Image (cartoon, rainbow, N blue to C red):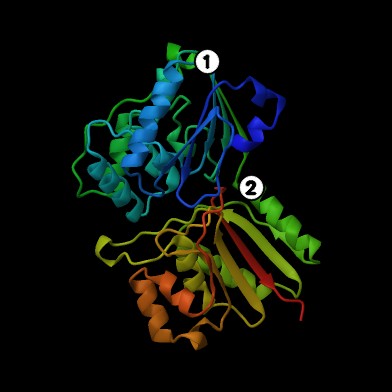
Amino acid sequence: MAEALLSTPLGGRIERALVVAPDGTPASFEDPRVELLRAAHPDPDRRSVLAARRALDLVRHCDWVLALISGGASSLICSPEGVSLARYVRVVRAVLLGGATVREVNVVRRHLCAVKGGGLALAAGGPVATLIVSDVVAGTPHDVGSGPTVADPTTCADASEVLRRFAPRLPIPAFRESLKPSSREARGLSARVVASPEDLSQAVAGALRARGMAVRILPSSIAASAELCLEYAARARRLRPGEALVRSAEPSLRMPHRQAGRGGRCTHLATLLAGCLPDGVAFLAGASDGVDGTSGTGGAVVDNSLVTRTSHLRVQRALASFDTGPLLRRAAMSLPGLPSGYNFADVHVLARTCG
């Protein structure tokens, strides 16, 4: 995003720029105006806190701010308020493992961090315009990166409710209120989503059509992995040779804390579905950012040969322990786990070969 902006006529007007990127992402700048920092993803670390402080310091001295926000920003800049960084990570992880959607998780994040929920915009010395590459299905500007530069209509009560639903054993922390759309400070803010998960679906569909496939794009989904598995199994039986279905998705997946292994929502869904696929049908579940949870992969491409490449018992054990990454790597069905520099949620492709 930063490279694209700096190459435009507007880029010539930029005086200073701060870019915060995850480890492994191919990013480098020779432009002396650009300061590049690295931070952790998907869980924030101390570098994330330092990056948040640097961002706050930078915007305080700007007459006008242009923010480029993409998926992953929730982790890359993080300044916990009212809790330690360690507790912040525990709370967010507990809500995720409890099966909350990304939008629900971000409600909690926005009320536990000084830069989220418009916190970065509040520190700015002038108007703030935001361009967003969204990784949230059906998301709004405040959902992406937990909305550091936009107003937030949700409240501390909403955050408490999310915590009670998905992590009921955790005590409610001292949530902070976010910047509200009706507040005076929100008047100088503007935001626009310039790319979304649906754009990723269109791009993947176009690439498949260029290879002669008949492609249909399904509506984006945040359904649970088990629900998507049943849907895809039924659709797979109806696919004709040369047909493919494409969808952007953020499946929810509830994982007991003690059983969470090296897996992710892509590898879990792919493993769950593989045994339900008819001959000649393959399924791809790919993380657009190249990192599928803790699986060590970028997702997987599977067909019904998974069981013969491993065993039924190993498949069931991997699903039960949410340890599907190693299973799929051993079966040579995993995608490389390399940061892509993009973040558009996941993409699913269900296809029947022409033969």
Direction from residue 171 to residue 52 in the image, left or right:
right
Foreground: 116 or 303? 116
Q: Please name the residue shown 54% across and 51% down the image.
A: 345
> Residue 325, position in %: x, y?
43, 70
Q: Which quadrant is home to the N terminus?
A: top right
Real-space Cα separation, disc 2 to disc 1, in angstroms? 29 Å
Foreground: 33 or 202? 33
> Residue 27, position in %: x, y?
55, 44
Label located before the other in sequence (2 or 1) = 1
Q: Which quadrant is home to the C terminus?
A: bottom right
The residue singled out by tag 2 in the image is: 198
**235 in relation to 161, above or below:** below
Q: Please name the residue shown 51% across and 12% down the image.
A: 63
- Identify the disc placed on residue 329: none
Foreground: 39 or 91? 39
Mark 2 crowd level (few <14, some 14–19, many ≥20, 10 Å Cα) = many
Foreground: 316 or 59? 59
The residue singled out by tag 1 in the image is: 127
**181 in relation to 247, above or below:** above
> Residue 92, position in %: x, y?
32, 46
Res. 146 image quadrant: top left
Res. 157 image quadrant: top left
**286 in relation to 88, above or below:** below
Mark 1 crowd level (few <14, some 14–19, many ≥20, 10 Å Cα) = some
Direction from residue 266 to residue 171 in the image, left or right:
left
Three-letter residue code for mark 1: Pro
SS assignment at label 2: helix
> Residue 316, position in %: x, y?
39, 79
User: Mark 1 and mark 2 in contact (Cβ < 8 Å)?
Assistant: no
